[in-house]
Amino acid sequence: MDIDIKQIGIFGLSFSRGFDQTWFNLWRKADGYSMDLHQDVESDDDDDDEVIDTVKKISFEQGEQMLAAIMEQGHAAEWKPNYNNEPEAVDSDLTFTLDIDDLDEKDLLFSSGNGKLPPMEWMNGMLAAIRTGEPTFATCFEQLK
C-alpha cells in the first residue's frame, strides 16, 4: 500500500508486556508535528519506577522527514495485520500495535500482533527512524534496544 506522508494525521507505534507499556505518536497539528512519548515499565529493582510522558513540537519538515524514514526504513506500509503464523516473524513476549491514520483520523493502515514481531530488519529500521526524534523510545524493552 502506498501512503502519502502528507496525508498522515497520526502515526503511532506501541509495545506492551503485561502492565508494562511504551508508545510513540507523531501527530500532524496546525503548526507542525507533536511527538508524544509515554513509558511505564517496571524495573527489576525495588526503586519507584518513573513514568515518562513527554510532548515535543517539531516542524512540518522534521515530521515529514521522520515519516519518510519510518515508511522507507521500517517498511511500515508492508507490515501484515498479524505475524503469529508468518515464517519471517520474530518470537517475542511483546504485543505491538502500529496505527497510521489519515488527516481525518480514518485508518489507512492498522497492524497489530501478539507474541511475534515483524522481521527485525524492519523493526530496527522503524525504531531507528523514530529515535532520530525520541532516542529512548522502546529501549525499556531488552529485545528492542
Image (cartoon, rainbow, N blue to C red):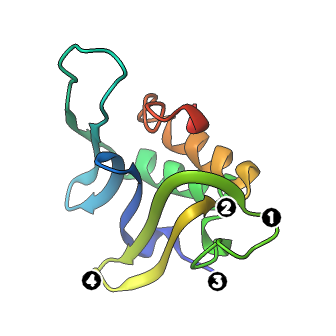
Between disc 4 and disc 2, the foreground one is 2
User: Where is residue 43 shown, x and y percent of the image?
Assistant: 34, 24
Residue in the image at 43% along x and 31% along y:
140
What type is the residue that disc 3 sits on? Met
Between disc 4 and disc 1, the foreground one is 1
Few, some or many residues within 10 Å of mark 1 (<14, 14–19, 20+)? few
Q: Are marks 3 and 1 in contact (CB under 8 Å)?
A: no
Q: Which mark is residue 1?
A: 3
Q: Is residue 51 above or below residue 64?
A: above
Q: Which mark is residue 115?
A: none
Report, in whole angstroms, how far the alpha carbon at label 4 lies from the one at label 1.
Answer: 33 Å
What type is the residue that disc 2 sits on? Pro
Q: Please state if 36 lies on the left or on the right of 84 as rendered.
A: left
Can you identify the residue that label 1 sits on?
Answer: 88
Can you identify the residue that label 2 sits on?
Answer: 118
| For marks 4 and 2 on the same chain, the one whose residue lies earlier in the sequence | 4
Can you identify the residue that label 4 sits on?
Answer: 104
Image quarter of residue 82: bottom right
